[in-house]
Amino acid sequence: MPTSPSSPVFITFTGADSMDLIPGMQALSSQYSVEWGILIDPARQGIPLFPDHKTRQAMQRSGLRLSAHVCGELAQAIAEGRDSGFDFSGYSRVQINHGRAGSSEQEIQNCYLFGVRHGVRPALQSQGVFPDDGRVDWLYDVSFGNGIKPSVWPPLQGAHPFCGFSGGIGPTSIRDVLQTLVITPGTPYWLDMESSVRSNNQFDLAKCRLVCEAAF
């Protein structure tokens, strides 16, 4: 039977893409444990989901808990051990979305060393049982921002690195997901969501609040 976990350490709301959202993000962060996932791909900046340079700078100066969700060539460069010189100040974690086929030993090591150099905690995606490699955080992700809920969630039991769950989690599903997860009581974890907290392709802070009210 599933073991109902305690609340997540924090919830990552991914896809904030407008400077106008910052006051509302700060207000929600003052009430709940929230991390804001900022999607970064220089080739796509300025389109929905990917804030432009000016907006990113404002968010980096906002005092919010931020994670950079790096995609495209920038993510590939990090995984290959190449340093782009990108400014990651203001971010406490960097999720390196370099591909959908998992990460090799060398890619994990490169991402770990990137985190050491930049003073951030790196995170990678997994598509099966959570790895036991503690050099990075691990996010179970088979949805890749498409709002697809997996048929089975991997268990999080025993000694593990810091791990998180994503895929089809949002205001209408959060309670059911929390009841379904198999997690040893007291084990820290986080949840991540993207498409389910948008309305008409715009980031929706009201939906973020509904999630927090249900989860915490």
Image: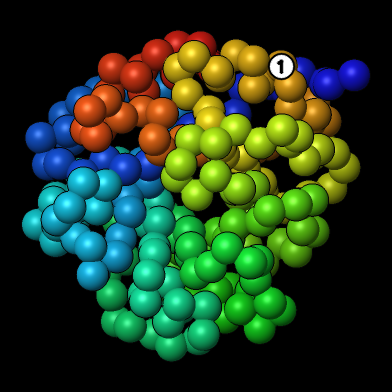
Which one is nearer the viewer's eye here, 117 or 172? 172
The number of callouts visible is: 1
Q: x, y percentage for residue 135?
A: 67, 67
Asked where in the image residue 138 lies, by quadrant, the reply is bottom right
Q: Which residue is pictured at 33% across the width and 54% down the height?
A: 39
Image position of 38 (left or right of 152): left
Q: x, y percentage for residue 53?
A: 14, 61
Colour scheme of the picture: rainbow
Vertical relation: 78 (above or below) 4: below
Neighbourhood count class around disc 1 (C-alpha, 10 Å): few under 14, some 14–19, many 20 upward: few
Q: Which residue is pictured at 36% across the width and 23% down the height?
A: 208
Vertical relation: 149 (above or below) 115: above
Q: Which residue is pictured at 40% across the width and 51% down the height?
A: 67
Q: x, y percentage for residue 12?
A: 45, 38
**Which amino acid, by three-letter code, is at mark 1?**
Gln
Q: Under tag 1, what secondary structure?
A: helix
Q: x, y percentage for residue 35?
A: 41, 39
Query: In the rendered image, which residue does mark 1 sit on?
Result: 179
Which residue is farthest bottom?
82
Which one is nearer the viewer's eye here, 98 or 148? 148
Q: Which residue is pictured at 37% across the width and 76% down the height?
A: 73
Image position of 215 (left or right of 208): right
Question: Where, quadrant-wise, is the N terminus in this rendering?
Answer: top right
Residue 204 visible, this orientation: no
Asked where in the image residue 19 lies, by quadrant, the reply is top left
Residue 210 visible, this orientation: yes
Vertical relation: 34 (above or below) 171: below
Vertical relation: 153 (above or below) 71: above
Image position of 50 (left or right of 37): left
